[in-house]
Amino acid sequence: MFRKLVTLSEAKRIIQQHFPPKPLEIEKIKLLDAFERILAQDIVSKQNIPPFSRSTVDGYAVRAKDTIGAEENKPARLRIVGLISAGEKPKTMIKQSEAAEIVTGAPIPIGANAVVMLEHADRKNGDLEVFTMVTKSENVMKAGTDIKKGETALERGQMLKPREIGVLAAMGLAEVKVYATPHVAVLSSGAEITEPGRKLQPGKIYDINAYSLSTAVLESGGKPIYLGVFPDSLTEMEKALKNALTSANVIVTSGGVSVGPKDVMPRVLNSLGKPGIIVCGIAIKPGKPVTIASATGKPVFSLPGHPASALLVFHLLVRPLIQAMSGRKPTEPLEVEALAGMRMFPAKGRRTFVMVKLKRDKSSRLVAEPASAGVSGAITTLAKADGFVEIGENKQFVEAKEKVRVKLFDEDMPQLHENMFPQHFLREKNT
Amino acid sequence: MFRKLVTLSEAKRIIQQHFPPKPLEIEKIKLLDAFERILAQDIVSKQNIPPFSRSTVDGYAVRAKDTIGAEENKPARLRIVGLISAGEKPKTMIKQSEAAEIVTGAPIPIGANAVVMLEHADRKNGDLEVFTMVTKSENVMKAGTDIKKGETALERGQMLKPREIGVLAAMGLAEVKVYATPHVAVLSSGAEITEPGRKLQPGKIYDINAYSLSTAVLESGGKPIYLGVFPDSLTEMEKALKNALTSANVIVTSGGVSVGPKDVMPRVLNSLGKPGIIVCGIAIKPGKPVTIASATGKPVFSLPGHPASALLVFHLLVRPLIQAMSGRKPTEPLEVEALAGMRMFPAKGRRTFVMVKLKRDKSSRLVAEPASAGVSGAITTLAKADGFVEIGENKQFVEAKEKVRVKLFDEDMPQLHENMFPQHFLREKNT
């Protein structure tokens, strides 16, 4: 069967052309539910924060000039005219030689412009002795110090983490506009596939992909809709996919795409809506048999059945789209430089991804050892690998000891910082 | 009022002594819900995976020795005795000079030990012509290649990400034992504090901490229980906290801990159960007024009211405990080396944390500029900072241009890898 393979960058371009990478609609959610969601609006403060000048200590609100020259042996003597508690509008006004007791966070009363700390003053016969000079604004957090009225405190596109959630709370916002989470329907196909938890019949294996891909959807900022396992039956799968298209923003299937006699995926994909298949095979290894369709304006990815291939293609093509739909910035894996542990051969004319484990040689240099000898589909190979080396389409081979860049699956890898000395981390620019 | 401050490391030791850092109980959950949970058991495979030898291609199952010498002009001629589909137990047995058509993933029939790819053979008059030699096991994924029966595929303590979830699915596990998620009750106290979403009365400010801390709980692997805002009333807060202690594993409050006339937190903390307060003030800046109690065997953290101080102390003391309870490994922030942008003075005798912004100077060196001039409580100062510099208790000051280590709030910072060249990342060992 003839297949026109496209290169990886052509595939990326075709996907972007059909599905411009941009956020879905905007929704308003409760601030407490907004962790790791993406802000869909600039946040401009409608008020000064704090809205009034506050004391940052417990002490006495005074006019700074009334304390000029005050010291331990020559205290300034002031008249106490009131107590200002936190959360109250001060009833007192401070005039010359007057002071008001004040607690942390309470508003500075009119007339006062500084606060003497509790431990630098003493009450004596109802009056106050101040043993130190304070300057204007000392121990005062002025109105608007934190956020000025009209200031843009947060920007559209920021991910909401504890600090940003705190800024929104400070402005009194109990709800916030964020980008909607893309819903991604996930199913596995293949006559030999059985759902985990069921008894395994002869000739069958358990499904891996619907589980690993659903989790990868979560990791990318999407919400997976688990559709389960489908045998290679055109009608059943078609029904499930058409149904999923009514609610999901993206569909990801795996398996059943080989050129074997029971291959039905291309037919199913073309039956879902126009224009149908837009990519049919990519010049990569592993992952060649990936098929991508556009159905009723929604992307349908048909990934290979091999778990490692499926997850790799997901990372290369599906994840960036989900990230864009959820408003996230595309993440590039952290890279580390290492020496090739052995000669690595790419597949002829295909961009090749070699799973590797990282080790240190006797001179403590990082070495990238291929994680498997030819068993590219094995899920444990993938689970035990630390990352992958990418070999270009036109490269003949990577020589043993040649410097390679390893894209890491995980950024927190003990062997990289085991001796606490600087490591060379790189981050690839978007390609 | 006298307070015996303890050092930061003493405080950590006291916390560990009362609350040994270890996971809570174990619970069994569905595999699809297990993303980023921590595995509570070693996973030993009860079967070979795959359970049988499978074809990795579409083609013909043969005995390798029957193809010896086969080439384009001198094909080996075999008799086709059947078709083996995926998901079926083969009914055919392969004898000398026989072959069976086979699809990707289907079991290798008894007698066969290799698979000839579809494109390397041709049917002729019902027989098969094989144009290339195959070696034993070629295009076969043998039983147990992925996971051997009895092999430990995953280890207790691993975080479940897409690849690990895939391994569990491969073994047919629809459920998995993980460590329970610690429940952390969060409340804010202080007469001036108003819940976001309500109208702000004079003298009041919006609550920040219950929001930023709840989110920080999520980030640490816990589940926040938002209790809301409480005025400085002993009875109301006591009731809420006693109630929270029946279900929460940890309690975190903030505010109301100053030495002012309305300070009630120490009394509340001591009323919750024995032994009561175990730490009352730590020699750090910011964060000095933190109070920690042990009530009915549960930790109660009373953090300062200033948002930046509360979040800093949370990171220093509360987060490691929540991580340990959820089975996670303690994370140390990523560090980067920079030059101090100006002279920085620590508070006398206190470990001092200076929030900084990172910039590049003309020579492209990283420079750490203090993010605020004395307004340590401001939430925007914190939100706009990139990390902090820690200055030891006995250090006089950090000189301008001195090398400092900046602990980053976030690991993905564009200015660190803007020119794609190696940056020096460090990771601190546990202290």
Image (cartoon, coloured by chain):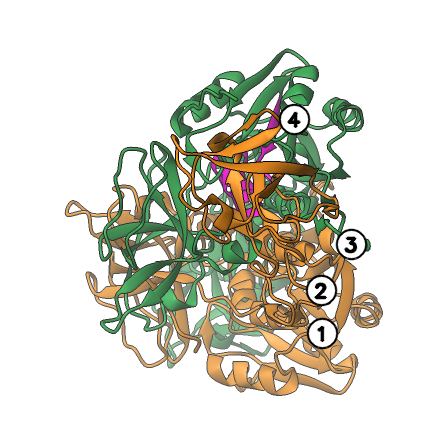
Chain colours: A orange, B green
Q: Residue furthest top?
A: B274
Q: Amino acid at mark 4?
A: Met
Dot 3 and dot 1 within a common chain: no
Labelled pair 1, 2 in contact (Cβ < 8 Å): yes
Residue at (67, 34) in percent of width and height:
B184
* x and y, in percent, of residue B372 in the image: 44, 56
| Distance (Cα) linking label 2 and label 4 | 41 Å
Labelled pair 3, 1 in contact (Cβ < 8 Å): no
**Which comes sooner in the sequence, label 3 or label 4?**
3
Q: Chain of mark 1?
A: A
Residue at (82, 68) in percent of width and height:
A247
Residue at (30, 62) in percent of width and height:
B367
| Distance (Cα) linking label 1 and label 4 | 46 Å
What residue would you read off at disc 4?
B265
Q: Nearer the viewer, mark 3 or mark 1?
A: 3
What residue would you read off at disc 1?
A24
Q: Nearer the viewer, mark 2 or mark 4?
A: 4
Secondary structure of residue under mark 1: loop
